[in-house]
Amino acid sequence: MFILPEFNRSYSSYEPYIDAKTMEVHHTKHHQGYVEKLNKALVEGGFEYSRIEDIFESISNFSDAIRNNAGGHYNHTMYWSILNSMMTSPSSELMELINSKYGMVDDFKAEFTKAALTFFGSGWVWLVINEKNELDILTTRDHDNPLMSDIKKGYPLIVLDLWEHSYYLKHQNRRVDYVKDFWSVLDWDEVSRRLSERPEMNDFLNS
Ligand code: MN3
């Protein structure tokens, strides 16, 4: 059984960039819903798992309900983990990778923002490290994830929720303002930690 991760900060921690009401509803209603539906679908299918990554590894064997809700659980858990109210900056390892692929950090942000704004519908935008040890920006539909066995695009370092429920109360239809505000609450320490502690490429790309 999976459980909703606790929020270790108050929902108002990310004001004025992400409002407290959005955080609360997003966490206690949307994310909670994905966890409940995932558990229900796993029980009905007779499955027992303790790691979402193990479900992702053979994702095409599962129902849409398991795919969507397992992705919903992982993606939201990761999204919460990369938010911070403190000013942080990329590690030197991450900075080198950004410089070699995009130029300055602002150039990377512009590319990531463009991907978020040109994506149509509900989904997620990601920064991943791929099997060539290069950074990549990509988008996934619904609750798909770069670690899913039929996607396998790399190990995720940054994720941003592009579903309207993540910004509509505050930003309404202005996804551009939501993405701009995201940079003010992105926890580069956690992104850098994910990079330095990423699993061996073989563990998640070739299995
Ligand atoms: Mn969401």
Image: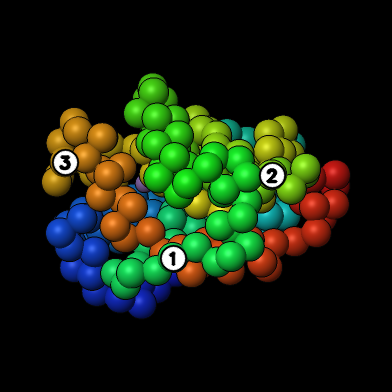
Residue 171, disc: 3
Which residue extends farthest bottom?
8
Tell me the quadrant of the picture where the N terminus can be found. Answer: bottom right
Residue type pointed to by label 3: His
Say if 54 sits above or below 59 in the image. Answer: below
Please tell me how crowded label 1 is: few (under 14), some (14-19), or many (20+) other residues with Cα within 10 Å: some
Check disc 3 and report its element: helix, strand or loop: helix
Q: Earlier in the sequence, mark 2 or mark 3?
A: 2
Q: Count residues near mark 2 (Cα–Cα under 10 Å), then give few for <14, some for 14-19, many for 20+.
A: few
Mark-to-mark CA distance, 1 and 2: 19 Å
Residue 77 pos. (x, y %): 47, 60
User: Which residue lies under the disc numbered 1?
Assistant: 89
Inter-mark Cα distance, 3 to 1: 26 Å
Q: Nearer the viewer, residue 122 or 36?
A: 122
Residue contact at pointers 2 and 3, CB within 8 angstroms: no
Tell me the tag on residue 134. Answer: 2
Q: Position of residue 53 (x, y in %)?
A: 68, 55
Q: Is mark 1 within 8 Å of ligand 1?
A: no
Is tag 1's residue or tag 2's residue first in the polypeptide sequence? Answer: 1
Residue at 32% in and 72% down: 86
* Closer to the eye: label 2 or 3: 2
Specify the amino acid type for callout 1: Ser
Is residue 206 at least partly visible in the picture? Answer: yes
Mark 3 against mark 1, which lies toward the viewer?
Answer: 1
Name the element at disc 2. Answer: loop
How far, Cα to Cα, is label 2 from label 3? Answer: 33 Å
Snapshot quadrant of residue 147: top right
Closer to the chain start, of discs 3 and 1, is: 1
Q: Quadrant of residue 10?
A: bottom left
Residue at horizontal 68%, vertical 68%?
197
Specify the label residue 40 is tagged with: none
